Image (cartoon, helix red, strand yellow):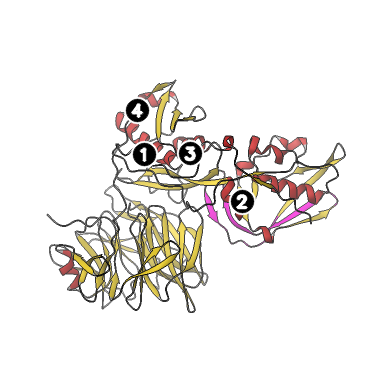
Amino acid sequence: MTRRRSLLAALALGLVLALAACTGMPTSGPVQPGLAPAGDTAPPAVAYFADAPRDGMTPEQIVDGFIQAGSDPRDNWGIARMYLAPDIHESWQPTESATVDLLAARTVTATGPDTVSVQLTPTGLVDANGVYSASDSGPTPLSFQLAQVDGQWRISRASNGIVLDSAKFRNVYESYSLMYFDPTWRFLVPDVRWYPRFNAPTRIASALVSGSPSPWLEKSVVTAFPPDLVVRAAVPVVDGTAEVELSAEALSLSSDTLDRMQTQLATSLATASVADVRMTVGGAVLAASPVATEPTSVGGRPLVDATSGGFGFLTGGEQIDPVPGLSAAVEAVEPRAIETSANGSFAAVRDADGRILRVPAAGATAVADTRAGLVDPTVDPEDHIWTVPADTPAAVVAVGAQGTRIDIANAWPSASRIASMQVSRDGTRVVALVTTGGRTALWIAGVIRDASGAPSALGPAQQLGLIAGTGVAVAWTDAQTVMAVARDGDETTVTEQVVGGTASTSSAPAEADAIAGDGETDIFLRGVDGALYVRRGANWQLMASGIAVLATQQGRVVPLP
């Protein structure tokens, strides 16, 4: 097999309208800054300039050249189209899908005088809507039919979409966040999408205005955009400001709706380095201002229960600053796991007897669940405590502030065991480390709520990826990223997974048993020996010792008045 290598060159300025760097909204506005592009550790953007077909190329060389040309999106994949016969030259749709594979495992083989098969080992797939899903399907064949055109071989039958090896994928596609609201309109919820880097603002605006959330998330979020609204033209970006031309239906919308639309567009396009947005109809600017939303970051100090010092915020590696009211109450119940509510009014605690308790900063402690083998509890923004036994993952229960018990329907139906579970700080999603078919996997599902805001069911579960070894703990580290701790023999690893994106796995301190993030930059790990670590770059730095519990937080804990 002969594989022609693409020439790697500097990125032409015309290839992209926006770079992958994060640009927040103006600091004078009341809305949260937009998220950085998901998984923003991508290599610097470069362009791949593919080779056009040469006379005399064999069918295998034509197919291989066509696949290599998938990394060159200039002129709507103009080079790749040169490898196609006239019958499919225009009808082939390169953005229908992108299959990410392992280049070293790819083979191109002639299976007949005019047929070629490409054997792929997919690691991920991007669909026509920009939704990424991890793949572990193993070797997968891709078939091509060829025909003679003016004495040269050309592809006469090919599937829509392109194939990109994992090294090139992040230079052709970039991740962006479509921003939706939670059903209370308090939080912004990112739905990560992957689009070719060129013309990203148009793709983002069109998907947000007239598209839908990812299927697993669809019943858990809301949007301000009415179903009949469309983007009527490409979205130009001039001096950092995008102009989104909407259809005439926008003229009849209320000011509240327009403000929410502005918020969604501005924060979504901020992930494509757009600093400001103007919505227009017929060239006239619509009056709209971003609305205030609640943050999901919790501050940079770890919340711990220390063997000497008690429960509170660790400062300077030694001092414990207690949480007024809550610290004494938590210390009194011998905690083994702790998650605090969004405002610090109570904590969900697993005690030494394995019970789940509601421990308020003021008032009496209440027992929430006494089932055997309960995993660490988690809390949602409506003050429900979520519990589940490790051996019965489908038996998820949410217990309200008054003790009302809700059985959560459709919870992890195919799992045989669950190691850890946590609700996102916006309350729209829940992530879990589960065992399915004898393998550890990271799963996510949307939270479906009734009109009162109480959770009632989970949406379709989506596998984010497989985890090597046995799952130990999982936590949300920011609005679009989760981290999972696992053990495989003597090795402990941490997997950082972008929801709707790619994952990376690295070594962690031996026998880490808990993880927490502050929603911004800091990640903390606790070891079974009581050591507390903080991530510094690619390393884990010892921060303190004598830590009995590393707590997780659902919001910024504030003192009671």
Mark 3 surroundings: few (<14), some (14-19) or many (≥20) residues within 10 A: many
Identify the amino acid type marked 3: Ile
Q: Nearer the viewer, residue 202 or 116?
A: 202
Identify the amino acid type marked 2: Lys
> Dot 4 corresponds to which residue?
253
Identify the amino acid type marked 1: Met
Tag 2's secondary structure?
Answer: helix
> Dot 1 corresponds to which residue?
25
> Dot 3 corresponds to which residue?
204
Q: Position of residue 113 (x, y in %)?
A: 86, 51
Rendered residue at 66%/45% (across/down): 70
Q: Which residues are magenta?
A: 113-141
Mark 1 surroundings: few (<14), some (14-19) or many (≥20) residues within 10 A: many
Identify the amino acid type marked 4: Leu
Residue 203 circle label? none
Rendered residue at 17%/73% (across/down): 332
First reached walking from the N terminus: tag 4 or tag 2? 2
